[in-house]
Amino acid sequence: MKKFIFLICCLFLLPHFLTAQTITSPDGNFQMVFRLNEEGTPTYSLTYKGKTVIQESRLGFLIKSGYAFDHNFMITDSQIRESDTIWKPVLGEYREIRDHHNELFIALKQEQTDWLLNLRFRLFNDGLGFRYEFPIQSGLRHFVIEEEETEFRLTGDHLAFWQPADYDTNEYELSTSKLSEVKDLREVVCSEPLAAQSPTERLAVQTPLLMKTKDGLYIHLHEASLVNYAGMHLNLDDSQFILSSHLTPDRNGDRGYIQTNSTSPWRTIIVSDDARDILASTLILNLNEPCKIEDPSWIKPCKYVGVWWEYFTGGPSTWAYTDYQDIRIGETDYSQLKCNGHHGANTQHVKDYIDFAAKHGFDAVLVEGWNEGWEDNWAYHKEVIYSWTRAYPDFDVEELHRYAQSKNVKLIMHHETTSAVTEYERRMHEAFQFMKDNGYDAVKTGYVGPIIPRSEYHDGQWMVNHYNRVAETAAQYQIMVDSHEAVRPTGYSRTYPNWIAQESARGTEFESFRGNHPDHTTILPFTRLKGGPMDYTPGIFEGDLSVYGGKTAKVSTTLAKQLALYVTMYSPLQMAADLKENYEKYPDAFQFIKDVALDWDNSYFLEAEPGDYITIARKAKGKDEWFVGAITDEKARTANIDLSFLPAGKRYVATIYADGRNASWNKNPKSYTIRSRKVTSKTRLQVALAPGGGAAISIRPVK
Ligand code: NOJ
Ligand code: CA
């Protein structure tokens, strides 16, 4: 009997003393091995269909000052469990999302200090997520991270879709090169006139990072649930092809203030041998906490127009009311100043946009330049801090509230902060209350320029907490948030779905500066959009900015591709960004923007290769309607669109908005055709895409 009990005890305790543990994904394609190596350093490795994705890679921390919390560990507990649940996003690409994973939990104790560190790995059919957990313990209550030492040891010189690390911006041009070529190209990209360049000490790139191996594996690295922690960049050792975490510091060089009883974000590795699976992956959302808003029924998809593009076209419109620069906010009496004569956000002009929105069925109108303080914006002198409650004299808040309400249109408020973030935090409650009092339920926030007056960077822990706090506070007021220039998203919109979209990458505005490369939007859905919806602001019909007299830039797409972006760039917040006059010139093409849905029951990733092409079909939520978007880079291509996602045995009408015969993004962007034809689930459409072109299709039942 005693022997038997001893045996049982040994069996029970065995896993705790084993230094290696293995888990597989539910479908068996992935295998992850955790091991404590000879130095007692935690490591992991990952294979997919028998191929190595990540070689044995170290985990741990360097803690201030100079203490290695990364070796001499022993395992004190380990658990394996399977979880298979289904949840419903408030707004999304799917009506339901399955979260099926196998989890390995490891509790560690460092021998010389008795400090505790836990690791949690979750292996899904689309990849791996893991995080550090800092349990409550008597010997360690808080600490400062000098660096997180998570490694991703790759197997070779993969092709990478990357942008250089920068603590303050994610608005670089996207580059495609081998990892070994990043170093040379980085110099070129960073010397661009519009590049920001906050210091990164070593050769480093941003996440989300997509790579493709020589034998056709797609590997996507990012993070999920970035909460109370710094955004992660990746150092690149380009001789051994090792990526390692590079947390954004504050300006004192500290990378995280950690109180125990907390966790790091999840480090995510999405992998497939089919590029479409990367687009379809829900791993990052699955690793975020469920919705924390008890009744999210007020969170609605939103299609909007705005007093916006006119500021970028080179026309005369200005955000500022006056040309006078010597403004002291709170002291300057604007009613005593002369308007410059071309202030965009004036009451009549906004009313015209409200009329346009009402006529064409848009939900809302964004108005930028409505509030005091824009005179100094472009200089970023920060002598001026905006008021978020005082409108310019020619913007009648009450009258516009009344008028918009009478037309059943909402106004979207704009809170540019030029990164005067401390001031914004102080004013946030009164600003949100002012919005509610005047009928606004959505705000576009902005963080242009360096953070003042604090010693912070845009992607550091303090700012991450700020963006999250804005979303959480806005939720208390039932306000939806669209943030620009914030840290790139990590799926937190699952938890706070009122954070309806973000910019956080190069959007359409750059087309007016110098243009995005035609392959830009064939990469973003693989990288930036895996973290969450993007306010890309598509829909530019007049792509030649020279018509406005002030600029020569040309939009890098055909008109038909602008339509396709409403499907390929997922977001429940979508702008029709062009001037209303340009939509009035092309009412037949505009019809697609009016029709397209923003919230979906299901999404079908039909064709995809990063940097080259993407074709996506989606079913509108709760409706018998489907929309398809197909885009290509600078090369002409034929989109092969298999409609087998349609219910069998039913007949539908497809309206196809395609590039005209001689269309091309740079020579003939406005040539398009619109035709209708009957289709069924057996139909295979072939649609020609012009260089820099695209196609958009709406599908409805035959009446
Ligand atoms: C940059 C934003 O991306 C853009 O949309 C906005 O109009 C300007 N900042 C001014 O706030
Ligand atoms: Ca290409």
Image (spheres, rainbow, N blue to C red):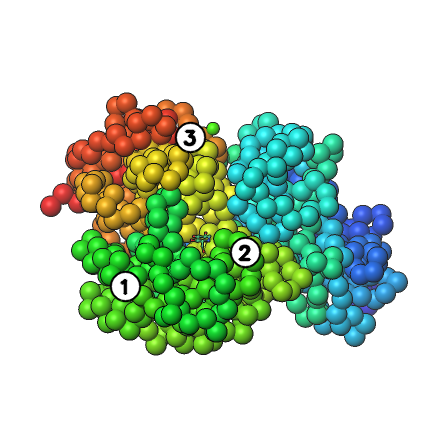
CA gap, disc 2 and disc 3: 35 Å
Confirm whether residue 124 shows in the render.
yes
Q: Earlier in the sequence, mark 2 or mark 3?
A: 2
- In the structure shown, which secondary structural element does the residue marked by tag 3 occupy? loop
Q: On the rendered structure, is 62 left or right of 89?
A: right
Q: Which residue is mark 1?
A: 347
CA gap, disc 1 and disc 3: 41 Å
Q: Mark 3, residues whose alpha carbon is within 10 Å: few (<14), some, or many (≥20)?
A: many
Three-letter amino acid code at the position of disc 1: Thr
* The N terminus sits in image quarter: bottom right
| Residue at screen point 29% across, 39% down | 541
- In the structure shown, which secondary structural element does the residue marked by tag 1 occupy? helix
Instruction: Work out which residue is located at the far top of the displayed protein and give it.
Output: 662
Tag on residue 633? 3
Q: On the rendered structure, is 702 left or right of 617?
A: left
Instruction: Work out which residue is located at the far right of the displayed protein and give it.
Output: 112
Q: Mark 1, residues whose alpha carbon is within 10 Å: few (<14), some, or many (≥20)?
A: some
The front one of 527 and 30 is 527
Q: Nearer the viewer, mark 2 or mark 3?
A: 2
Q: Which residue is mark 2?
A: 380
- In the structure shown, which secondary structural element does the residue marked by tag 2 occupy? loop
| Residue at screen point 62% across, 65% down | 453
Q: Is residue 683 above or below residue 361?
A: above
The front one of 34 and 16 is 34
Q: Earlier in the sequence, mark 1 or mark 3?
A: 1
Q: Earlier in the sequence, mark 2 or mark 1?
A: 1
Three-letter amino acid code at the position of disc 2: Tyr
**Image spot of residue 577 (x, y percent):** 33, 48
**Image spot of residue 249 (x, y percent):** 69, 56
